[in-house]
Amino acid sequence: MIDLDVHNAFLVSFLLLESSRGLEGHNRSVNHYNRKLEFQQDREACMASIDRNRVLSLAQSLIRANSENPPGHEREVASILRRHLESFGLLCKVVGSSERPSLIFSTGEDLDGNLLLHGHMDTVPAGARESWEFEPFGAELVGDRLYGRGACDMKGPLAALAETMILHSKENHSKPLIMLATSDEETTCGGAEEVVKSGLLDGVKFGVCAEPTSLNILVGEKGLLWLRIVAQGKSAHGSTPELGENAIELCMSALETLLREHYSFEQNEQLGVPTINLGRIEGGSKINIVPEDCEAEIDMRLVMGQDSKEIVGRMGSLLTQQGLEDRVRIETIRSKPTVLTPKDSEIVAATQEAVERVTGAKPSLGTATFGTDCSVLQPKAGIMNVICGPGSIKMAHQPDEHIDVNQLFEAIEVYRAIAKWFAGQ
Ligand SMILES: [Zn+2]
């Protein structure tokens, strides 16, 4: 929240400073002042229309409906969200199974909007109850903090998006605002995949993912490539290793080559450099047996200029060069492409301006160290995303997860401003 007196004092001194620079500067500063003042009034009107109790009670209901993934039971969360938004006249389309649905809401009759606000309905498991001071599904409000699994990732943010939709639907805009609530984000982004396949979001240009960023802006995320390296040897007694073939040694020599290789990439200030981590290795059964099997798992985080299939192909040829192709194979466990929205994209400009106007602070621009539905929606549906949401990512997936409710309300203002920016195009 901006302290109004300090803010206005700043504007007056800014005005005086600018006016001393001549008429041109004076006019510019008056315009600047008027714009700020208009926004201030607009903002006060906006704040007046947010129904804080409605937002909090929706967030609490969503937290109390356990949707831990795995196993993933989003049905109850989906029905709470759907009932809430349909009671305000919003249109809802359901994609996927009734057990694990994804919901698309619109403020209009159809889905021909420019802007999509999105979040997921599943959460990671609460984990051991004793590591929590607060009840994970109690949704307790203590002071300005709302506690519970999903408070910031992302049931609180979903409540902020729902309120934005309700308020936006009460105004006259030529283009509808679209909201997506997905299932199964935390494990596979499977809900987002089903939504893309449905084609219902075809034509939507821009997206705001409401994952918690403390209202800073993330413009992309590294790609992901998880691989399993499987070595097949031949068993023999430990006293006669020459009669067998040691799978652990085969795996080690393959790993030495694969981990040392330089996989080319495009330099990018936002995304940084790619990484590779050998996270797991398992092989052999007993000290006196030549191991027959060994497997290792590698976690690669990719940047622009890197393609999963090309990397796996390159690894295959390295194994062939080593003569290991018959005994070592590479399996892809999971892959996700790198996504990056250009800094000069309109969605970045609109979000920067909205956050700065609402919070008074310039948001930082960065990239996500975590994965989101953007990695599906951006490459497969062509939606240019930013990630910007209330709450801290440090709280996500942690015991005593919580969100600052004031930031939750600020987020609604931010989303409303972005929605207005794109509503008439
Ligand atoms: Zn999340």
Image: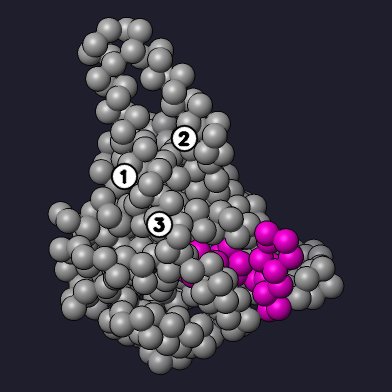
Left or right? Give the position of 195 relative to 329.
left
Q: Are marks 2 and 3 in contact (CB under 8 Å)?
A: no
Magenta segment range?
137-159
Residue 393 pos. (x, y %): 59, 53
Give the Cα separation between the discs numbered 1 and 2. Answer: 13 Å
Q: Earlier in the sequence, mark 1 or mark 2?
A: 1
Amino acid bearing label 2: Lys
Give the Cα separation between the discs numbered 2 and 3. Answer: 21 Å
Q: Earlier in the sequence, mark 1 or mark 3?
A: 3
Q: At x 48% / y 31%, what residue is drawn?
A: 8
Residue 113 pos. (x, y %): 20, 65
Q: At x 46% / y 35%, what residue is drawn?
A: 362
Which of discs 2 and 3 lies nearer the camera? The answer is 3
Residue 143 pos. (x, y %): 72, 61
Amino acid bearing label 3: Cys
| Quarter of image, res 343 | top left
